[in-house]
Amino acid sequence: MPHAELEARLWERVWEEPGSGRRASFFPHILSEAVRDLTAEEQIQTWEHPTKGGVTTELIIPGNVDGRWTYIERVIRRKAMLYARFLRWSKTEFGPAGEAVVRASLTDAMHRGFVPITPGFGEVGTLGTASVRGPLDSGAWMLVNDPVARLPVPHAVLFEIKNRRLTLYPRHAEVHQLLYKAAHFQQELPGQRIVPVLICRRAHKWLFWMAKDLGFIVHDTKKQYLTLPDKTDPRLLEEVRAGLALDDLQLVSSTSQPRIHNLFLEVLPAQARAVAERWAQAGSTLLKHYQTMRDDRLKPWTRTEALADLRADAALALDAAGVPPDEQILAWALEEDTDTPEGY
């Protein structure tokens, strides 16, 4: 099976031990460590299989195939065909689908005070007099009542949308791409209330802890949105869902238009003011760390060191902001030198 299926079955679904009824799920970094250990012990092996469509897939198969190769080979061909189909779609169909769902959801929420920063809630590369290289995926103005002045205050809600299989952790470059851009805007516009929001398919709990400390919002949809190429039979999508346990694949089409309501109608109205305050006081002061960690070319051990440095300076920033120690989490830095698998 591909690693994506392994995570789907043992992390996203609840695994039940045959016979005992015991149920458990395993975090992605635990699964990655288990794969490394079992590979080293030759209990499993990685198998590359080229498909007829020209895509080479990487699958996990048993280490010992004696006496059962015919069956295993048949399964390899089927899994490789399905995974190759998924990989082809991922190159063109996932990113635009995720952005379309977010922008449509924002449009639906305009009655709650969301106003596009750019037409159609499109990409945001400029905010007032400040600009950033590489625009954010979307942005909205949101009016939030100031309890002291009793007047509405405009908050800039800035979105990055990561509609990928990867479960995001604090160490991942995708997180710091958002934080770097939001921190840059905050430093250029110190009086502006800014709310950074990361929308992704899945996030580990450590990323939610990091967001609470630094002042940003993580929303994991637990869905991976996609469109299909023209004239694609929808049954092909169902084959991928069933064959690879990718239950969360959700089609975006003229007849299927999913929305994200909770984030815009409940979470942001309740949290935007406090998040913007924490971001201005603490999270936005750590720009140099985000600048380092947004580089997806960093070696894993360098990334581990960089995350530890970020955590250390985050503790100082929280102290300087007057955040009581019992409200600081700071337990979100991975102490290992290997990232979860990329590119699937």
Image (spheres, rainbow, N blue to C red):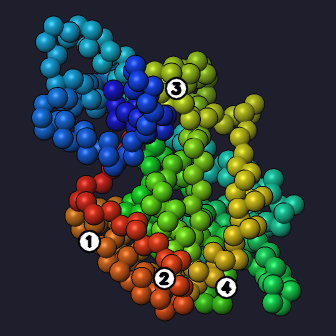
Residue wearing tag 2: 325
Q: Which mark is residue 151?
A: none
Q: Earlier in the sequence, mark 2 or mark 3?
A: 3
Q: CA distance from mark 3 to mark 1?
A: 38 Å
Q: Which mark is residue 241?
A: 3
Q: How dense is the environment of label 4, judged by Cα within 10 Å: few (below 14), some, or many (20 and up)? A: some
Determine whether, in the image, residue 234 is placed left or right of residue 295.
right
Determine whether, in the image, residue 27 is placed left or right of residue 285.
left
Q: CA distance from mark 1 to mark 2?
A: 23 Å
Helix, strand or loop status at disc 1: helix
In this rendering, the answer to whether 120 lies above or below 259 is below
Q: Nearer the viewer, residue 242 or 42?
A: 42
Q: Earlier in the sequence, mark 3 or mark 1?
A: 3
Residue type at mark 3 is Arg
Residue type at mark 4 is Gln
Helix, strand or loop status at disc 4: loop
Q: Earlier in the sequence, mark 1 or mark 4?
A: 4
Mark nearer the viewer, 2 or 4? 2
Residue wearing tag 1: 305
Residue 113: percent from left, percent from top = 83, 67
Q: Earlier in the sequence, mark 1 or mark 2?
A: 1
Q: How dense is the environment of label 3, judged by Cα within 10 Å: few (below 14), some, or many (20 and up)? A: some
Residue type at mark 1 is Glu
Residue wearing tag 4: 192
Looking at the rendered image, the quarter that the C terminus falls into is: top left
Is residue 241 at least partly visible in the picture?
Answer: yes
Q: CA distance from mark 4 to mark 3?
A: 44 Å
The residue sitting at 61% across, 22% down in the picture is 234
